């Protein structure tokens, strides 16, 4: 079955985003293999999670455009994002020989936000666990899905405060646009849901 025009636009936009991030990624030299994995995992893990998160509010629309292949696409972005975002602290822990890099930091206000990526990773795993168990154990699993947005915000602030690549204005702009779009779409969809429920009550 040939791709619809909307599908081609979405795929092109997604690939363009990856290419743009890749270009800026290589603009900052990496010192060794660990530095490469740490930075690559962070940037492309965030990008993949952003795309997967952006897809969720438009499940119905995207299903009409892509059909059953949408589910596979969503899973690919989610799994890819999870693997890459996990590689980020794993590589850092091996480099530093320190497993405490997985533990959230509550020692200070700055410490919490600058190392917020640690808590973000926990939130991402909880959100995915909720999605996996949604049919059997968790009825209100969509509440856990909100954790993805919180995780993106924490990861973004973490990158802004101590991320190497965020010193590049291009990366800063791209990822700032991503986080704004994420919450903009979330608010817009909640507003539409509110209006739909309000209209039903009137009827």
Image (spheres, helix red, strand yellow):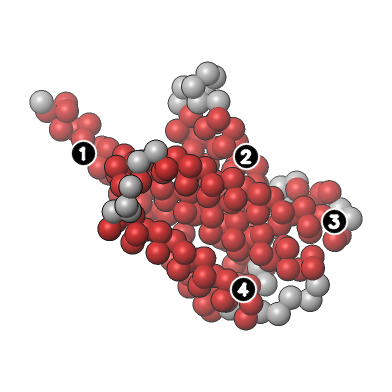
Q: Which residue is mark 4?
A: 25
Tell me the distance, in whole angstroms, between the alpha carbons under discs 4 and 1. Answer: 42 Å
155 up-or-down from 197: above or below: below
Residue that carries the numbered disc 2 in the rendered image: 125
**x%, y% of residue 116?**
64, 54
Marks 3 and 1, the one that precedes in the sequence: 3
- What residue is shown at x 45% (from left), y 33% (from top)? 142
Q: Nearer the viewer, mark 4 or mark 1?
A: 4
| Residue 62 picture location, percent across and down | 34, 45
Alpha carbon distance from label 2 to label 1: 31 Å
- Eyeballing the image, is 199 above or below 24? above
Q: Earlier in the sequence, mark 2 or mark 4?
A: 4
Residue beneath label 3, please?
A: 94
For the residues labelled 2 and 4, say whether their Cβ atoms are less than 8 Å apart. Answer: no
- The disc, 2 or 1, on the residue closer to the chain's N-terminal end is 2
Residue 125 at least partly seen = yes
Q: Earlier in the sequence, mark 3 or mark 2?
A: 3
Q: Quadrant of residue 88?
A: bottom right
Q: Residues within 10 Å of mark 4 (few under 14, many from 20)?
A: many
Alpha carbons under labels 4 and 3: distance apart: 22 Å
Tell me the crowding category of disc 2: few under 14, some 14 to 19, or many 20 or more residues within 10 angstroms, Cα based. some
Task: Find residue 31 and name its label.
Answer: none
Q: Earlier in the sequence, mark 4 or mark 3?
A: 4
Give percent across and percent down for residue 22. Answer: 57, 71
Q: Which residue is mark 1?
A: 195
- Residue at point 33% right, 47% down? 1
Tell me: 73 left or right of 155: left
Q: CA distance from mark 2 to mark 4?
A: 26 Å
Q: Residue furthest left?
A: 203
């Amino acid at each position: 079955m040939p791709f619809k025009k909307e599908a081609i636009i979405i795929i092109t936009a997604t690939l363009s985003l990856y290419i743009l991030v890749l270009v800026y990624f290589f603009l900052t030299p990496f010192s060794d293999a660990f530095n490469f994995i740490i930075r690559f995992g962070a940037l492309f893990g965030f990008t993949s999670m952003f795309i997967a998160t952006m897809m969720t509010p438009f499940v119905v629309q995207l299903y009409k455009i892509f059909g059953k292949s949408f589910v596979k696409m969503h899973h690919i972005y989610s799994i890819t994002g999870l693997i890459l975002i996990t590689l980020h602290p794993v590589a850092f822990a091996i480099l530093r020989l320190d497993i405490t890099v997985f533990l959230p930091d509550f020692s200070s206000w700055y410490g919490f936000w600058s190392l917020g990526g640690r808590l973000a990773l926990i939130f991402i795993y909880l959100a995915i666990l909720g999605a996996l168990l949604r049919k059997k154990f968790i009825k209100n699993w969509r509440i856990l899905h909100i954790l993805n947005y919180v995780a993106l915000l924490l990861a973004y602030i973490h990158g802004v405060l101590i991320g190497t690549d965020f010193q590049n204005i291009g990366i800063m702009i791209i990822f700032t646009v991503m986080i704004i779009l994420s919450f903009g779409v979330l608010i817009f969809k909640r507003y539409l849901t509110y209006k739909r429920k309000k209209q039903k009550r009137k009827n």
